[in-house]
């Protein structure tokens, strides 16, 4: 097979068994890689209904065909598992260098079950794997762990690992790599921590066979010429996603006071937050840009705070807060201090915690305090008024250290509300997951994606919201014909995530480039008809995991505030109340599901590649 090694590594930490598996070739064709292929594998090898922290629970680190191909922006990987937040399917995606490193080490993915008696890591070198002791690494922060590995193993490795948050089983814990890159959301870091697994470490130089290597070289050359004059290319190199903060704040997309009000209602203006937005945060604090594997855009950056209370350590690369962190740690809590924001973001990276979920939990706690629901005594004497950056930093520190009230808050906002027995009216969650800093009241397609994607609460799963961005306000709130756009945009994103591409390629690369590259890498066609079939198949495979866990549409809830109940009184989204039920109905009609979220039998048969789902949902009648 072109674009793949053809092997998956399976490791059982209970028994110590290490095994290479050659999964069926048609799985690669039907599911490509990433979350889609990961779902097919977990559906096959992980028993339904198992304890998320139990012996049978499995976590996978899986690449796509673009990883290791050297095609521009094609180096991402995914982690897949059951979520400890909602007990359903979870996938999270990340860039950096780990995706290509898995391929160079000889595998398309690594799947781990079992529970070790002591901390360990999995070491893979050129197609050979072993389980190694990690006692000396357990408890280390992200930076300390990376520095320790470099000291012990040298620089020629790449690791996907957990921080102290994952070790302590926080459902906010994510999977880290390259110091501060994170596959966040859904708590897979806690699943890894429950296995006493610190990291998967890869090294090697095994070649990857491509269907047309020269074709990829030529395509990259043409893309390099095209990108020179593309405005988004220049903006991303300069500011990354920080450039989106100010436009999103103006449009009503960014979070303000835990999404409770519009910016207009606070009496503030966008100019009040200019210090945490591009270009100011880049002009003042940007140290140097960096790129993920095979990416020419270099949209990432490290930052330095040179002096003062929030001075950064010159010996540690500190990641620049990107849009989501600016949204939650900035306007989401009315913080205008860029230096406190940089260090709050850094605390999360060091602990291995998802900045979106920590930010959403922090904003919930602030609203509870400011509305008199939580007292300063319940917050360890901290009085976190809106805009008090020092108090917000102290609470973030407690969350990242899981100490005092932070031990409760580190369980996420919904669990904290349950523990305190109050504050539920201020939650802004989907199935218990804090959502991204994108308001569905501005782009209503987000409400369907947040609620009914197999991994709820995510903004990177495509769908109608992407089409909303191209629509007038009147069309955005016309619910008559949303289903087709929703499924089509979802399909594009399913393909991008499965292949190992960066989502920005859909906005920057011309025409059918990302589909042409798939043929050059794998030798397989991907036309628009095939894209639609793949999108439905990929989504359904991920959703089937939830169905097997006994979950149905009604189990995937959103909070009333998210849908505009009650509506905001001012700003660009004043008076908006969403009809999430109809948006969900339209999506299910278009994809071929019953309204309870169960796929039609004929859709499953027509789409192909889903016999395992048919077997479970529509078992043949027993012969008499």
Image (tube, rainbow, N blue to C red):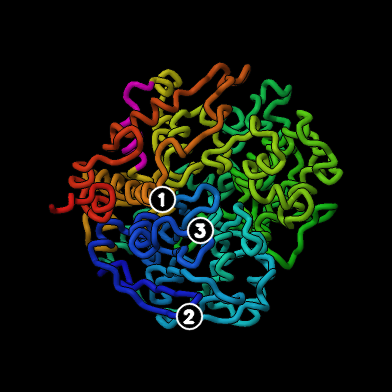
Q: Earlier in the sequence, mark 3 or mark 2?
A: 2
The residue stretch that appears in magenta: 479-490
Most prominent secondary structure in the magenta stretch? helix
Task: Please determine whether, in this image, residue 36 is positioned above or below residue 379.
Answer: below
Can residue 86 be seen here? The reply is: yes
Helix, strand or loop status at disc 2: loop
Q: Can you say which quadrant of the picture contains the N terminus? A: bottom left
Q: Which of marks 3 and 1 is nearer the N terminus?
A: 3
- The residue that mark 3 highlights is 52
Distance, label 3 to label 1, CA atoms, is: 11 Å
Q: Where residue 318 appears, x then y in whole percent?
A: 68, 59
Q: Residue at x 29, y 37 (%)?
A: 593
Task: Please determine whether, in this image, residue 70 is positioned above or below residue 380.
Answer: below
2 and 1 marks in contact (CB < 8 Å): no
Residue 446 or residue 551, whichever sits in front: 551
Residue 77 or residue 24, whichever sits in front: 24
Q: Which mark is residue 549?
A: 1
Q: Where residue 143 appears, x then y in whole percent?
A: 67, 66
Q: Quadrant of residue 453?
A: top left
Task: Please determine whether, in this image, residue 112 is positioned above or below residue 476.
Answer: below
């Amino acid at each position: 097979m072109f674009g793949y090694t053809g092997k998956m590594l399976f490791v059982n930490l209970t028994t110590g068994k290490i095994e290479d598996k050659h999964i069926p070739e048609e799985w690669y064709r039907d599911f490509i890689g990433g979350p889609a292929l990961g779902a097919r594998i977990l559906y096959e090898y992980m028993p339904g209904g198992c304890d998320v922290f139990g012996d049978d629970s499995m976590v996978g680190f899986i690449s796509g065909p673009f990883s290791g191909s050297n095609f521009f922006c094609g180096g991402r990987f995914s982690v897949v598992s059951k979520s400890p937040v909602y007990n359903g399917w979870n996938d999270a995606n990340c860039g950096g260098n780990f995706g290509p490193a898995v391929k160079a080490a000889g595998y398309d993915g690594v799947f781990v079950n079992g529970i070790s008696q002591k901390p360990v890591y999995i070491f893979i070198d050129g197609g050979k794997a072993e389980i190694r002791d990690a006692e000396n690494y357990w408890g280390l922060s992200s930076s300390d762990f990376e520095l320790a590995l470099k000291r012990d193993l040298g620089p020629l490795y790449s690791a996907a690992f957990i921080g102290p948050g994952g070790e302590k089983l926080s459902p906010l814990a994510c999977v880290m790599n390259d110091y501060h890159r994170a596959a966040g959301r859904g708590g897979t870091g806690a699943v890894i921590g429950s296995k006493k697994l610190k990291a998967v470490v890869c090294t090697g130089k095994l070649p990857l066979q491509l269907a047309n290597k020269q074709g990829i070289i030529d395509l990259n050359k043409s893309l390099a010429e095209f990108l020179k004059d593309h405005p988004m290319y220049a903006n991303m190199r300069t500011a990354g996603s920080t450039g989106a903060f100010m436009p999103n704040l103006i449009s009503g997309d960014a979070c303000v006071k835990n999404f409770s009000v519009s910016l207009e209602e606070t009496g503030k203006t966008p100019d009040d937050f200019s210090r945490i937005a591009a270009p100011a945060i880049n002009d003042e604090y940007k140290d140097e840009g960096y790129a993920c594997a095979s990416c020419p855009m270099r949209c990432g950056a490290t930052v330095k705070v040179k002096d003062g209370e929030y001075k950064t350590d010159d010996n540690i690369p500190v990641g620049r807060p990107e849009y989501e962190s600016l949204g939650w740690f900035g306007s989401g809590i009315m913080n205008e201090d860029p230096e406190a924001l940089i260090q709050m973001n850094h605390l999360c990276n060091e602990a291995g915690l998802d900045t979106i979920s920590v930010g959403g939990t922090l904003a919930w706690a602030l609203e509870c305090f400011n509305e008199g629901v939580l007292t300063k005594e319940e917050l360890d004497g901290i009085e976190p008024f809106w805009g008090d950056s020092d108090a917000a930093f102290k609470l973030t520190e407690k969350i990242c250290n899981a100490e005092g009230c932070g031990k409760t808050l580190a369980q996420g906002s919904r669990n904290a509300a349950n523990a305190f027995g109050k504050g539920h009216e201020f939650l802004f969650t989907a199935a218990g997951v804090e959502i991204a800093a994108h308001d569905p009241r501005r782009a209503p397609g987000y409400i369907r994606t947040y609620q009914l994607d197999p991994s709820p609460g995510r903004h990177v799963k495509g769908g109608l919201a992407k089409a909303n961005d191209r629509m007038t306000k009147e069309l955005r709130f016309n619910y008559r014909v949303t289903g087709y756009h929703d499924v089509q945009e979802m399909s594009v994103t399913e393909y991008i995530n499965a292949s190992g591409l960066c989502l920005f390629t859909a906005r920057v690369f011309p025409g059918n480039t990302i589909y042409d590259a798939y043929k050059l890498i794998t030798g397989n066609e991907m036309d628009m008809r095939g894209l639609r079939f793949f999108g439905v198949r990929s989504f359904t495979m991920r959703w089937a995991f939830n169905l097997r866990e006994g979950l149905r549409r009604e189990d995937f809830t959103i909070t009333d505030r998210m849908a505009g109940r009650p509506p905001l009184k001012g700003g660009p989204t004043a008076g908006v109340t969403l009809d999430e039920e109809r948006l969900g109905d339209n999506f299910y009609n278009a994809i071929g599901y019953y309204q309870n979220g169960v796929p039609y039998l004929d859709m499953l048969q027509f789409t192909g590649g889903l016999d395992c789902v048919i077997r479970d949902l529509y078992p043949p009648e027993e012969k008499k």
